[in-house]
Amino acid sequence: MAREKPVKELEDLPGIGETTAEKLRAAGIDTIDKMATLAPHELSETYGLGLETAKKAVQAAKEATTINYTTGGAILERRQGLGKISTSSKELNELLGGGVETEAITESYGRFASGKTQLGFQITVNTMLPRDKGGLEGNVLFVDTEGTFRPERIETIAAAAGLDPKEALDRIIVVRATTTDQQILTIDRADKLIQEKNIKLIVVDSLMALFRSEFIGRGALGERQQKLNQHIHKLQTLADKFYLAVYITNQVMDNPGILFGDPTTPVGGNVLAHAATTRLYMKKSKEEKRIVRLVDSPAMPEGEAVIKITPNGIRD
Ligand code: ATP
Ligand code: MG
């Protein structure tokens, strides 16, 4: 069901074309909210717009910003209509309150072979399924920064989920990014692609690998975190704007500050810790078993689920 798209970009305002929008952005007026605070005559004089046009644009911006006033009841109603992508494990779905949520960023972190990529493949396939089968009837943008996307694996998992394997592959847009610039640009320019291809899930596997290899040492950390912050912010914006899910995988390090207990800590620092809506810590267990621990969620209690990585994908 297509929801009416609210005014979100400057270009959505009457009388504001691309050129004017660019000028406004360059002057720091980059949101509808900021537009709403402008005096029409100021706008008219500074940017050479007709006064009537300026009045209409500011008025439209004011009207659009009032959308932000909402009641708890309205949010509840909206959230009940939120999409959830099944993980194909009942236990893990329950831990997540139904599945991987749209309009949110879900992060999985863990050591190598803990199942982060496999879970990514599974929800990639499941996104294509009908809603009553745990899907979103949508397609997937898969940003592969480690070269670990495996079409053969997708085919097997898709066939097991009752989909045509070749069709399933055609419904995944894969971007192999080898620099952080490519990774960032892919997301920055994704708006059009998302709309044209009905993208309902964005996977970034892994989010941090390129950032870690490009920004080395203490001196580079500030810049890295700043870029990372913008990148994640853009992912969250896309999730909100297009009602889609974002799944990112993350690497770990041993935190020497933790003397007792498990020193395994996700990389990315506070920037990532605050940005991820839901965080999952994945751990290898016996044979094909993996323990998935919910470490951070806005609404669900902490807890664990045990899943299996089978030839057909994730299962209980
Ligand atoms: P990394 O940090 O190295 O990217 P990861 O957490 O992404 O690791 P995955 O690639 O998701 O790890 O998991 C790899 C594991 O998945 C393998 O060790 C194997 O146990 C399991 N696996 C992969 N392919 C299959 C398959 N076809 N059948 C069964 N299990 C598989
Ligand atoms: Mg992986």
Image (tube, rainbow, N blue to C red):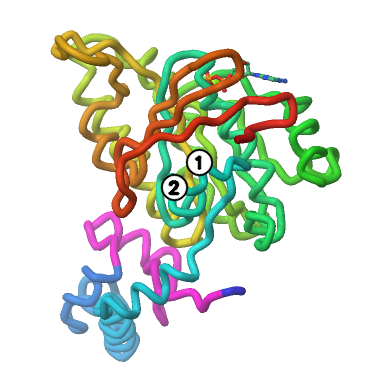
Figure check: 297 above or below 53:
above
Could one spot residue 210 in this view of the protein? no
User: Closer to the camera, 79 or 12?
Assistant: 79
User: Closer to the camera, 259 or 66?
Assistant: 259
- Please tell me the numbered disc located at residue 96: 2
- Please tell me the numbered disc located at residue 92: 1
Figure check: 26 above or below 164:
below
Residue at 29% across, 34% down: 272
Residue at 56% across, 26% down: 117
Mark 1 is surrounded, within 10 Å at the Cα level, by few (under 14), some (14 to 19) or many (20 or more) other residues, namely many
Quadrant showing the N terminus: bottom right
Instruction: Mark 1 and ligand 1: say if the CB distance to the nearest ligand atom is below 8 Å.
Output: no
Q: Are marks 2 and 1 in contact (CB under 8 Å)?
A: yes
Mark 2 is surrounded, within 10 Å at the Cα level, by few (under 14), some (14 to 19) or many (20 or more) other residues, namely many
Amino acid at circle 2: Leu
Amino acid at circle 1: Leu
Which element carries disc 1, helix, strand or loop? Answer: helix
Residue 43, x across and y down, in percent: 22, 76
Is 28 in the magenta? yes
Question: What residue span does the magenta drawing correspond to?
Answer: 3-31
Residue 112, x across and y down, in percent: 49, 13
Could one spot residue 149 in this view of the protein? yes
Furthest-bottom residue in view? 52
Residue 258, x across and y down, in percent: 16, 14
